[in-house]
Image: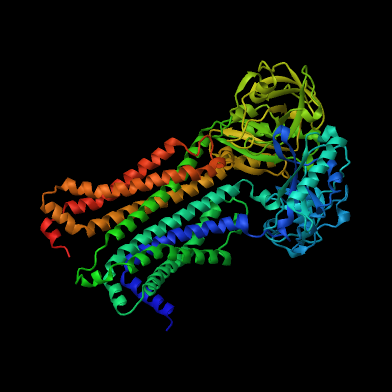
Amino acid sequence: MPPVVQDVRYGVRLLWKTPSVALIAVAALALGIGASTAIFGVVDAALWKPLPYRDSGNLLVLWEKNPAQDEYRMFVAPANLPAWEQNRCFSGLAPVLDGRINLTGGPGGHIEPEEVAVERVAASLFPLLGVQAAIGRTFHEDEDRPGQTGVVVLSHGLWQRRFNGDRDIVGRNIRLREQAYQVVGVMPAGFSVLDRQAALWLPLGLDPYDPKMARARILAVVARLKPGVSFDQAEREMDGIGARLEQSNPPLDRGWRPALYRYRDQIVGNMQSALEVVLAAVGLLILMACANVGNLLLARGASRQRELAVRAALGATRGRIVVQLLGESVVLALTGGLAGLILSPLLLAALTHLGAETVPRIAEARVDWRVFLFALGVSLASGILFGIVPAIHASGANLSAALAEEGRGGTSSRSGRVMRGLLVVVEVALAVVVLIAAGLLMRSFLRLRARNPGFQANSILTFRLPLGGGRNTAPERRAPFLERVSGDLAELPGVQSVGAVDSLPLTGLGVGSSFVIMGQPEPPPEKRPLTLVRSITAGYFKTMGISVISGRRFDNADSADGPQVAIVDECLARRFFAAGNPLGGRLTLDQPLRKQVGIVGIVNSVKPEKVEGEDWPTVYIPYAQRPLTGMTFVLRTAGALPALAASAVRAVHQLDPDQPVADIRPMEQVAGEAMAGTRFETLLLAGFAEIAFVLCAVGIYGVVAYDATERTREIGIRMAMGARSRDVVRLILGQGAWLAGCGIIAGLVAAFALTRVMSSMLYEVQPSDFPTFAAIALLLGAVAMFASYLPSRRAMALDPMAALRHE
């Protein structure tokens, strides 16, 4: 029988004979390996697994940037596309325009109306990505022309959800915005372009010379590098094209240049650093588990010195003994790895649920062969890592002395105690790093939650009312319909106030415009400041709890035929009016058509995109004077939100049965989703910190308790010579305090160096935050004292005579 097989069989028998040691070790390893495997599955799906496109590494996403305005990822002006297409570094460019559209009919006629996300794309996009339709086809070039866009490609999810996976739907019509579109194809499951929520695709039908849209920055552009062309080469060439556009079209392009991003970076966004931090944290957990198991094996090795001496006396070399002991460690690690692999799908399911809205491609995370190989590799590496030190130490002990210890069973040597102490110091240091990282994120998250976003989110129900189809599409019908809806909603039981806005706070920047303040020097178009523009109804500020600082709110007199008015926020007033009081002033908005408005009020600023984000200058326009096709209602209520939601949908459908009602959710949920990424990172690291805390406490307790048992005879002698109970307690507590103190100091130094990488994840908290560092140090110190006190109590109760007869 080969020696390796013999070692494995012997290792299994030994584990079977010492089930308590085996169960503790397997449990620690299963927890560490299971957590790391689940996290690896998430990180692998988001960062490393190949994208479902041909040669995805050559795909880029192109935006425009304006460094002078601190903007680096803005939409592209269609008028610039003809010049961009003259490049020599891309094999193709495909513009994309995202939006929303009303689905009102299927092949069988009218269906329950629904607003869905849509991407309007160039016909060249799908060949550029190298993806074909699962059923049917994608667009032909002649279908991607202005006025010739009556075809649609469905996502796999929408096809299954609304059309029951009917394979005969290709060639049949559905209704979007009350117009018929022929279904030409269905994309594969999981396919997306830039918007993961897109339910269907329409031809863009772009005319870059159309004066209505040529100057508006509205597009994203997908590009593919030619073979042999590097990212840096493409950046240099596109920068040159941008410089020429600045010279040839300064009103549009002065200060603007193309901005290139790799496709994967576009999808992953700012989650990459957070996922890497989480992966590093779970790696520290594995090291802590290895330290714990290593201490168990060191303790067991002390009791096996006689057995190993016999093996050496029979001719076993030191190397053979090391291999034997490592074999036992690997068997133990593989058992823990198998348990962790069984646990990982449950952990992965929990992570998928927790990070569904924030982690890109997390739905693709699976326990597949890549994850299996990772778990196998981690198990083998862990077995060698926690087994090598005990194996070398045990094989190098004084075997002659061990043989002479007739029946004493072998006690641990001083070097063994030092080795176990070092492992505990390492374990405590690792725990300090994980706990400080979690503490920093927790403090950051609490500060984020305490930040005032500028409105009161409690007791508010929101829902979108898309008016881009059906009988209320015409501009002259939108405002009257919205007014009737507002009136009926206000009559519902429990409703205290009703308002509407085109873009809710914390959901994105939305529509913006450059502007000019009348009476001040007019800057050239490329240097004009930017502001967000919001259309609102009269009750919006009251419903949202947005304070009016001075002036007035809108009222029914602010109609389409009345004076053109606006309300600005304090951010705009503070930045652009020297006295900070713009009341009575006038400004001109450039987009979409130049429009001059008089300022009648100032309100406090609200966060448009992120709670931790900056304030943006914002101009509010009465809806009647800017009737858009999509508005979001906000209803403040004293009653239950679910009951109000059902009543609100009924009220809308009584006025128009074909009117979709979308995105029904509490405003508190909207605010929560804006912090979902931070909450995901915080909860994950907090969970790891709890595991690290337990492992650290168990590690300290195990070493101190084992050493107290080993020193029973010494303690008996001390007590027989007059030592009192408190002296024994001081002796044992001192050992625990020394180990914990060394580990805490080492951990604080390591955390001070390592937490710098978390700077971008923190809000109003420094990576070297003193209260966090101090609190973790005190907490672990207290835990170490408690874990050491338990063995000291047992030692204190020893009978000196019994202790002297020990062994």
Q: Position of residue 267 (x, y in %)?
A: 66, 50
Viewer can see residue 110: no
State whether residue 529 is above or below residue 675.
Answer: above
Quarter of the rendering occupied by the C terminus: bottom left
Task: Using residue 189 as the reference point, say whether residue 393 is left or right of it.
Answer: left
- Residue shown at 73%/21% (left/top)? 557
Q: Residue at x 71, y 36 (%)?
A: 71
Q: Nearer the viewer, residue 318 or 284?
A: 318
Colouring mode (rainbow / by chain / secondary structure / one colour): rainbow
Is residue 290 in sight in this rendering?
yes
Tell which of 272 and 416 is nearer to you.
416
Quadrant in which the N terminus appears? bottom left
Q: How many marks?
A: 0
Residue 755: image location, x then y, percent: 50, 43
Query: Residue at point 58% right, 51% down?
Result: 356
**Left or right of 47 on screen, residue 318:** left
Residue 33 versus residue 543 in the image, above or below = below
Q: Is residue 19 above or below residue 607?
A: below
- Give how far across and how far down residue 158 sits, in percent: 70, 55
Q: Nearer the viewer, residue 656 or 384?
A: 384
The percent coordinates of residue 168 (x first, y second) are 77, 64
